[in-house]
Image: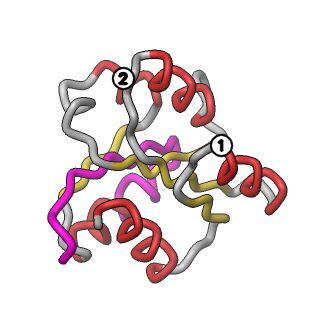
Amino acid sequence: MIRRAYIAVIDDDESIRESLPDLISMFGHEAEAFSSAEEFLASKLIDQAKCLVLDIAMPGMSGIELQRELAQQGRQIPIVFITAHGDEQVCGRLRRSGTIECLLKPFTDTALLDALNAVVR
């Protein structure tokens, strides 16, 4: 059985921040969007996140830098990276580093659902 999880969407693209939380809610989870890694780190919701849907390339702190920062803080939050600028080589390296999934934009609803289900089972 899949349990309801709190998922943080972190992306500088406003259209992603507007659409993904609604989609994630349709999947049966709670979601909140953040426009930057710094905004997420400063939030009170950091301790509730069961998964991050995280853009790789953002102004300021990148998604990969946020992953490193969370690891340095001892936080083990599963990450589904999303990117419009990456390629399969980048995604392969991320998967080997412990990332749950790396999705190239545009990705399907099914691909996101499968990645989230892998985290919250």
The amino acid type, in three-letter code, at marker 2 is Leu
Mark 2 surroundings: few (<14), some (14-19) or many (≥20) residues within 10 A: some
Secondary structure at numbered mark 1? loop
The picture places residue 4, in percent across and down from the top left corner, at 15, 63
Residue 14 located within the stretch drawn in magenta = yes
Along the viewing direction, whichever of 87 and 116 lies nearer the viewer = 116
Which residue is at a point 39% across and 52% down the rendered structure image?
17
State the residue in front, 96 or 94.
Answer: 96
Coloring basis for residues: secondary structure
Q: Amino acid at mark 1?
A: Ser
Is 54 magenta? The answer is: no
Residue visible at 27% across and 30% down in the picture: 46
Q: Position of residue 95 (x, y in %)?
A: 65, 54
Residue located at (20% from left, 64% from top): 29
- Report the disc number at residue 97: 1
- The quadrant of the picture occupied by the C terminus is bottom left
Query: Crowding at label 1, few (<14), some or many (≥20) Cα neighbours within 10 Å?
Result: few
**Pointer 2 or 1: first along the chain:** 2
User: Is residue 25 found left or right of 112 in the rendered image?
Assistant: left
- Residue 119 is drawn in which quadrant? bottom left
Q: Is residue 90 above or below residue 72?
A: below
Q: Is disc 2 placed on a helix, strand or loop?
A: helix
Question: Residue 41 got which mark?
Answer: 2
Please give the range of residues in magenta: 1-19
In the image, which is nearer the foreground, mark 2 or mark 1? 1
Residue at 44% in and 52% down: 53
Q: Quadrant of residue 107?
A: bottom right
Q: Position of residue 32 (x, y in %)?
A: 26, 48
Number of numbered discs visible in the structure rendering: 2
